[in-house]
Amino acid sequence: MQAEPQAEQPEATSRPPLPRTEMRNERTTEIDTVGTLELLQLLNAEDGLVAGAVAATLPVLATVVDATVARLRAGGHVHYFGAGSSGRIGLLDAAEVVPTFGADPSMFVAHHAGGEAAVAQAVEGAEDRQSLGETAAAGLTSADVAIGLSASGRTPYVAGALRRAHAVGALSVLVSSNLAAPLAGLADYSLLADTGPEAIAGSTRLKAGTAEKMILNSLSTAVMIKLGRTYSNLMIWLSGTNEKLRLRQVIILMEISGASEAVCRIELDRCGGDLRLALLCLLAGLTPESAASALAAADGNVRLALAAVAAADGVER
């Protein structure tokens, strides 16, 4: 008896390898069945893993901060390149550096795949085009720092920007939550926070997004501190652009100088609202004009300006 021909078996399909950020999280498989409090506790427990993952990047981040400070002092700029949630977090950090530290808007610049329209609503396919990243990075020079933001570590838009950065000699950095990020080979330095699978598979706006926010917060803040934009742990380049910030200026001035609120308000007014000048006047007995000269000679660093004034008059401050 002749054997019946076997039915043709479908070819085995292999799933492309996923970065850990997009794998299924075994700790949260029942997240859609539990009560609201337990659901929030599951999310919070995953968030609790982020700080440790970011801590592992700090040795490399320290090197990046120092290299960035050197580039900025030489006239360069920092450029963020990202898509989706990663790009929006870059936009937020770049925007907040300006009012927080009195930075020039051109010091930190964010580029988002799809442009401004993609900030509020996704522009389909924008992140998949390397050419858009290359175009966004067209203005980079060898003095600049290019920071690619990609949770998966494989976004084509970011690849295009990093390739352009390498071509012109800009310092290139990748921020990702994928330890095996394919784009790492395009960057001089890689800040890879191993945040693992998200609570909800595919939603890298969660732990990976939090890790990126923490890294960029640390990067921009550390750079500003190194550039003398703080005195101790106080923001003395703060601009009094509204009543809340003007009050904050007074509080900071009172904290450092020990002077009364009335005296601090008068000094701020005499110095045209410049907190740094008011501080130098109160601590060193300078006029606003001499304080401005001392500050300019110290490249805007209040601590260095105070030291120079003290050395000139032989008084320890």
Image (cartoon, rainbow, N blue to C red):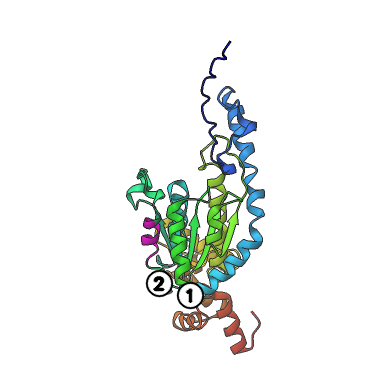
Q: Residue 89 colored magenta?
A: no
Q: Distance between the Cα atoms at labels 1 and 2?
A: 9 Å
Residue beneath disc 2: 272
Neighbour tally class for label 2: few under 14, some 14-19, many 20 plus, Cα within 10 Å: few
- What x and y, as percent, mark residue 206? 54, 41
Q: Looking at the image, which residue is at 49% across and 57% down?
A: 148
Q: Are marks 1 and 2 in contact (CB under 8 Å)?
A: yes
Neighbour tally class for label 1: few under 14, some 14-19, many 20 plus, Cα within 10 Å: many
The segment highlighted magenta reads 131-138
Magenta: predominant secondary structure element? helix
Q: Tell me the quarter of the image containing the N terminus.
A: top right
User: How many marks on residues?
Assistant: 2
Q: Secondary structure at mark 2?
A: loop
Say the numbered circle drawn on residue 277.
1
Q: Amino acid at mark 1?
A: Leu
Residue, far front? 1
Please indicate, yes or no, whether residue 91 appears anywhere in the rendered image: no
Q: Which of the 4 image quadrants contains residue 306?
A: bottom right
Relative depth, front residue between 222 and 281:
222
Q: Looking at the image, which residue is at 53% across and 58% down?
A: 174
Q: Secondary structure at mark 1?
A: helix
Please indicate, yes or no, whether residue 3 appears anywhere in the rendered image: yes
73 horizontally vs 125: left or right: right
35 horizontally vs 163: left or right: right
